[in-house]
Amino acid sequence: MHDLVHLPVTVGKYLVSPLTQVLQNGWFASSVSIRAAGGAERIVRLTRLFRDPLSAARYAMGEGLQWIGAPRACAAA
């Protein structure tokens, strides 16, 4: 079952996908994939750790949207 916050979001020419991974200590790391329409992709590994995957994914999505300069309304959607 996928949580809605883990689904990719298209903003303009970008596809922003949050990624999470459980670590050996039980905490969750987050990354975000930012793919442009031309196929170029950048994966940003984020340094904050979280106790649950939902918080990690929300943080990753917020950082990805900020990275591409999306308006705040997109981040809240």
Image (tube, rainbow, N blue to C red):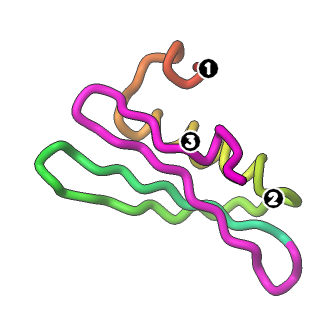
Q: Residues within 10 Å of mark 2 (few under 14, many from 20)?
A: some
Q: Residue at x 67, y 71 (%)?
A: 21
* Residue identified by numbered label 2: 50
- Expressed as whole percent of the image width and height from the top left, the position of residue 77 reads 58, 20
- Expressed as whole percent of the image width and height from the top left, the position of residue 39 reads 16, 55
Q: Residue furthest front?
A: 1
Dot in front, 1 or 2: 1
In this rendering, the answer to whether 41 lies above or below 71 is below
- Expressed as whole percent of the image width and height from the top left, the position of residue 62 reads 57, 37
Q: Separation of disc 1 and disc 3 at Cα?
A: 10 Å
Q: Residue furthest top?
A: 73
- Where the N terminus falls, by quadrant? bottom right
* Residue identified by numbered label 1: 76
Q: Is residue 19 part of the magenta span, yes or no?
A: yes
Q: Is residue 66 left or right of residue 14?
A: right
In this rendering, the answer to whether 34 lies above or below 75 is below
Magenta-drawn segment? 1-26
Q: Residues within 10 Å of mark 1 (few under 14, many from 20)?
A: few
Residue 75, located in which quarter of the rendered image? Answer: top right
Q: Residue furthest bottom?
A: 24
* Residue identified by numbered label 3: 61
Q: Earlier in the sequence, mark 2 or mark 3?
A: 2
The amino acid type found where label 1 is placed reads Ala
In this rendering, the answer to whether 68 lies above or below 38 is above
Q: Is residue 61 part of the magenta span, yes or no?
A: no
| Element type at mark 1 | helix
Contact flag, marks 1 and 2 (Cβ < 8 Å): no
The amino acid type found where label 3 is placed reads Met
Q: Identify the mark at residue 35; answer none if there is no mark.
A: none
Q: Is residue 62 left or right of residue 26?
A: left
- Expressed as whole percent of the image width and height from the top left, the position of residue 68 reads 35, 36
Q: Nearer the viewer, residue 71 or 6?
A: 6
